[in-house]
Image (tube, rainbow, N blue to C red):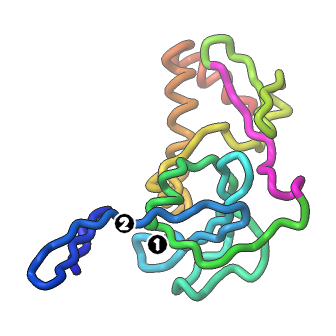
Amino acid sequence: MKDYGDIRLRENEGVWFIAMKKQQRTKLGNVYAIPLPDGRFGFGRLFQDGAIAIYKHIGQSIEDVPQSEEYDFIVGVYRDVLTCGDWPVIENRPFGNEEESWPPPAYIWDSLSGKYKQYYKGEITPSTKAACKGLEIAAVWASNHIIDRIMGDDKWQRINLEWAYIKRHGQEAFDEYTKDS
């Protein structure tokens, strides 16, 4: 058998067969092992609303799983990141109740109006800068963005907001705006 990512070639009595890699199913509470560039593993747990909670624990091997439910961050993730098989499901940790399975609120900042909103359980409500302080930006992340953040590089969250504000209001306005942050 030869493996070419999503396609596998299998030989049977001199005849080659093409097989697509089987997609993983997603299930609330699934714990995914996230291979990191340095050979270690991050871990993430699937929440409602397409969110993944990334554990604070970094394992030395795929068997070195987190022992507690302590998360570093929780963000939306593209479905294909979880189904393609690059992040294998290592176990399922069911939630105690439905409320626990929802990610915390995230915020939306409109660069045109400067207004803030909160996203929670599929609903968007008006908010303020103060109420949004400390919340994650409501966004869907690709695997490389999540891996960068696990490795300590938070550029993806920072860059998008700064760029949008500077483009709309200018560098001086951005410097003034962030002075009290």
Residue 181 locus on image (x, y percent): 73, 34
Q: Residue at x 20, y 70 (%)?
A: 17
* Magenta region includes residue 30: no
The quadrant holding residue 115 is top right
Q: How many marks?
A: 2
Q: Say left or right for 86 vs 49.
A: left
Mark number displayed over residue 35? 1
Mark number displayed over residue 21? 2
Magenta stretch?
Answer: 98-110
- The amino acid type, in three-letter code, at marker 2 is Lys
Q: Say left or right for 170 vs 26.
A: left
Q: Earlier in the sequence, mark 1 or mark 2?
A: 2
**Within 10 angstroms of label 2, few (less than 14), some, or many (20 or more) residues?**
some
**Up-down relation of residue 113 to residue 56 (above or below):** above
- The amino acid type, in three-letter code, at marker 1 is Pro
Q: Say left or right for 128 vs 14.
A: right
Residue 88 locus on image (x, y percent): 51, 72
Q: Say left or right for 153 vs 117.
A: left
Q: Front-most of 36 and 77?
A: 77
User: Which is more foreground, mark 1 or mark 2?
Assistant: 2
Q: Front-most of 58 and 14?
A: 14
